[in-house]
Image: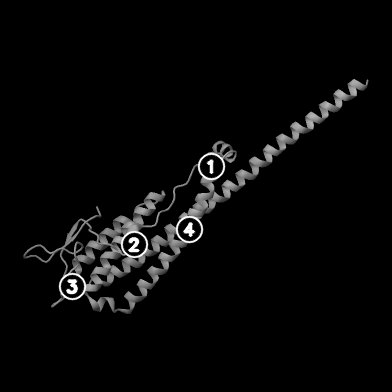
Amino acid sequence: MFNVFNRNAMFLIISIVILSVILLIVWYVIVTQRRLVHLDELCNNAFHQIAVQLSSRWDAVLALVKMTQQYAQHEHATLTDVIAQRRSTQIVTAEQMSQQEGFLAGVLNRLMVLSENYPALKAQEGYIQTMRDIRQYEENVRMGRMVYNDSATIINRMVRQWPSSIVAGMLHFAQREYLKEDETKKGYPNIDLNINATMEQPSGSSIHQEATVQKPANEDRTHIKGFR
């Protein structure tokens, strides 16, 4: 009888241990899943917020382009077409986001060159205020990129590390791409847009933009490359 009691007690202890392990595993899976979902939503939200800010920046850049119409009509038409083509591209990946930022920075660079050739354009109050708005949008994008990359770092670590990697694999969570800062915004290097555009130069202007604005012999043309 004593042996039967011991066997029953041992069976009870083993059952409790097994049940505890199962409950612990279930608890860990639930906690890890909630954590992964939270980080995934942070990434998605930050990504969409950046997309919204990019759209606002495109709107502001388009407003700047409209201001150039009375100074350089052909340049205005060219940049308007470029903006219409590029901003309509759907952004679903981090690489596409970075490419979109690069295109936008290129158009901004072209506008900066144009404003240097036309001081009256640069002095307009509307131009000054729009440039301030663009800088604010850029700051919002920078903050959104920080939130996204921080969340992506944590979720990528959980996807790769054991035992959270097991849960991530079971629930189909994948590593997130990082958003890289657009290098073309650092110093605004020369750009080309792959479109020939005649630019009206102000009389007596002695400003020449190397590589960005090229003047073939006996012609007054702006060569814009890079956007197709």
Q: CA distance from mark 4 to mark 3?
A: 38 Å
Which residue position holds label 3?
Answer: 207
Look at 44% across and 47% down and name the residue there.
Answer: 177
Amino acid at the residue labelled 3 = Ile
Which residue position holds label 4?
Answer: 146
Q: Is 120 positioned to the left or the right of 94 in the image? A: left
Q: CA distance from mark 1 to mark 3?
A: 54 Å
Look at 86% across and 25% down and name the residue there.
Answer: 8
Q: For numbered disc 3, what is the local secondary structure?
A: loop
Residue 213 location in percent, x, y?
18, 64
Q: CA distance from mark 1 to mark 4?
A: 20 Å
Please identify the quarter of the rendering in which residue 132 is found: bottom left
Q: Residue furthest left?
A: 218
* Mark 4–mark 3 CB contact (< 8 Å): no
Q: Residues within 10 Å of mark 3 (few under 14, many from 20)?
A: few
Which dot marks residue 185? 2
